[in-house]
Amino acid sequence: MSQLTLDFGPPPPPALANFVAGRNRECLAALQALLAQLRSGQSPDGRFIYIWGPMGSGKSHLAAALESNRLPQLCIVDDCQRLSPPAQEALFHQFDAMMQTPAAALVGFGDEAPARLPVMPELASRLSWGMVFCLEPLADDELQAALEQATRERGLAIG
């Protein structure tokens, strides 16, 4: 007997609209506001945002969602905890350069709060200049809602 696999198609690309926020609504709202202000040419209120949290909390989804907007004035740095020393120094200098460009913004992501990142202290300080959000994993009922949303996006219905 052979099994057939069902091709449900690829999942929809990550977007802020399909991020199940749960207890992370404030973070999602800050990112939505940032994108809206950048698109309208305004100098964003929250130019520097750092988001951290445990694996599976949605950091990569949010980073990919921001990347998909392809805004040249938005710098996105994922996995800050993995930056090499030269990359850390470059990012540190980028912060300083961005201070001269009010319409530019930076969103960083990592596994730890800025002060606990294995990066040079000056960079850790820069990463905590703006808003810092700790993503909370979804609760059981939120996970169920996320699963239902994922199945709807693929054209399936579950009971």
Image (cartoon, rainbow, N blue to C red):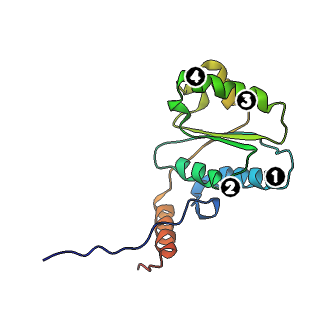
3 or 4: tag closer to the N-terminus: 4
- Circles 3 and 4 in contact, beta carbons < 8 Å: no
Out of 92 and 131, give the one closest to the viewer: 92
Q: Which residue is mark 1?
A: 37
Give the vertical position of 137 relative to 159 (above or below): above
Task: Provide residue 36's location: percent of width, then percent of height.
Answer: 78, 56
Label 2, secondary structure: give it: loop
Q: CA distance from mark 3 to mark 4?
A: 14 Å
Q: What type is the residue that disc 4 sits on?
A: Pro
Label 4, secondary structure: give it: helix
Task: Provide residue 55's location: percent of width, then percent of height.
Answer: 46, 44
Q: Which residue is mark 2?
A: 69
- Circles 1 and 4 in contact, beta carbons < 8 Å: no
Out of 47 and 158, give the one closest to the viewer: 47
Q: On the rendered image, what quadrant is the C terminus found in?
A: bottom left
1 or 4: tag closer to the N-terminus: 1
**Numbered label attached to residue 86:** 4
2 or 4: tag closer to the N-terminus: 2
3 or 1: tag closer to the N-terminus: 1
Q: CA distance from mark 1 to mark 4?
A: 31 Å
2 or 3: tag closer to the N-terminus: 2
Q: CA distance from mark 3 to mark 1?
A: 19 Å
Q: What type is the residue that disc 3 sits on?
A: Phe
Q: Could you tell me which residue is drawn at 53 percent across and 42 percent down?
A: 53
Q: CA distance from mark 2 to mark 4?
A: 27 Å
Using the rendered image of the protein, determine whether residue 32 is visible from the camera's viewpoint.
yes
Give the crowd class for mark 3: few <14, some 14-19, many >=20 residues within 10 Å: some
Q: Residue furthest left?
A: 1
Q: Could you tell me which residue is drawn at 71 percent across and 24 percent down?
A: 93
